[in-house]
Amino acid sequence: MEPSVRKVGWRILLGVYPPEFDGKERLALLHSKVEKYEKLKEIWKKAYQQGRFTKAQIEAITLACVDVVRTDRCHPFYYNDGKNRVAQLFDILATYAIYHPAIGYHQGMSNLASLLLYAQGNEGMAYVCLCALMKRLTPKFYPQHDQVMMITQMQHLHDLLVFTDYKLAQFLRMHNLGNMFFTERWLLLELIREFPFEHALHIVEVQWASIAMVAQTWPDVGSTALYTQLGIEHCPAVFEEKETHYACCDSNLINSLIGEQFQYKQPSNQSNEPLYCPTQKKCRDVSGSVHEGDPVHMKDWVVELPSPDAMGCGNNPFLLFICLSMILEYSDVIYEEVHEVCDLFHLFQTHNKQHNIWGILNRARSLFDAYLKDQEMKRKCFS
């Protein structure tokens, strides 16, 4: 997508406004959402300044602080702008976490928001786009959702590899890699951390466009209907009624990004007030959180693949084909260098942000097109 149309194009692909809206209606809706964002942001910042944050709220935005200061910092968009855009990225993520308490903040969300902020060039609009994107991604981040979607996507990726390259699938299985756990970060963040920043922009919009394309024939693909309650635009934030002091290390970190107007000042005497323990700087481990037991069923043969609205729970079927193409891209190296589980993790870490994006995407498109044609033919036969 050309940079000149990316700003509006992403809003359309993410479903920020209904497709039937004309230009004036779109702008009016967008401006109203941005205005609401500014009000929500001011409310939580004042509550923080007054010392009325709950422990969960402090933990969420402290973790966001830790991530934003190291997200894409070498890119000129951030590097050449001092702390202004870093602070904007923090505000977006903190506002989302405060008003979506069931989700909060998880590692990797800063990378998603960073792409949106860059493409939109506006903090409020980036927040609106993040809310739209998270409606679809929520099941991957929701801590009480049992990771059904992640496990299903790994299962179907395993099935895809068995279906496409039986020999390679059996090789991985022989080395205890057939469960596809090594692809967890790929699936969770939809590959944005596997490619350089400019390529990550392309890799996400290709996936979003594929969802819109496939949904014309399979309407449930990319649907957020099942997750409306989880991905609701925002919930009323609940703050403490009385001031409860924060740990100095947390308030110092948050104060560095929240803006001077809303900084929290530690009282000189805290002896009579409860004090939150310092937040443990732990985020969700995106490389090992579904590894209890082995939920992925190893298969000897796969003769039929799920339909697009079932592939990976119908959330983003093309993502699985890009992941498949990533694995196939390194098949020769895998045969030569992989002897145990850690070897494959090391292989992809070594090649991180150096992948041949065009070769990988071309192969993925070819495989996906053949799959869609086959699925459409089967549907016509049974209709």
Image (spheres, grey):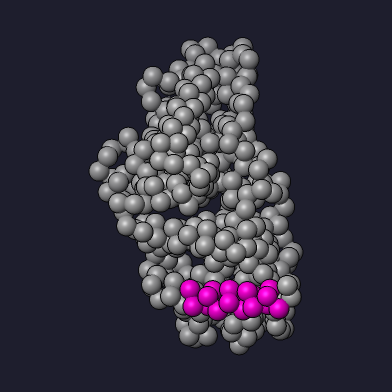
Placement of 10 over or under 346, stated as above or below: above
Q: State whether residue 292 appears in this view.
A: yes
Quadrant occupied by the C terminus = bottom right
Residue drawn 46% across and 29% down?
32
Q: Main secondary structure of the magenta part?
A: helix
Badge count: 0
- The residue nearer to you, when weighing 77 against 344, is 77
Placement of 303 over or under 106, stated as above or below: below
Q: Quadrant of residue 324?
A: bottom right
The magenta span reads: 365-381
Residue 246: image location, x then y, percent: 54, 24
Residue 348: image location, x then y, percent: 47, 70
Q: Quadrant of residue 298?
A: bottom right
89 left or right of 210 in image? left
Quadrant occupied by the N terminus = bottom left
Residue drawn 42% across and 46% down?
116
Residue drawn 49% across and 78% down?
366
Q: State whether residue 273 appears in this view.
A: no
- The residue nearer to you, when weighing 96 against 206, is 206
Residue drawn 41% across and 36% down?
24
* Residue 367 among those drawn in magenta: yes
220 left or right of 125 in image? right
Furthest residue in direction left, as rendered:
80
- The residue nearer to you, when weighing 209 against 236, is 209
Residue 125: image location, x then y, percent: 42, 38
* Residue 374 among those drawn in magenta: yes
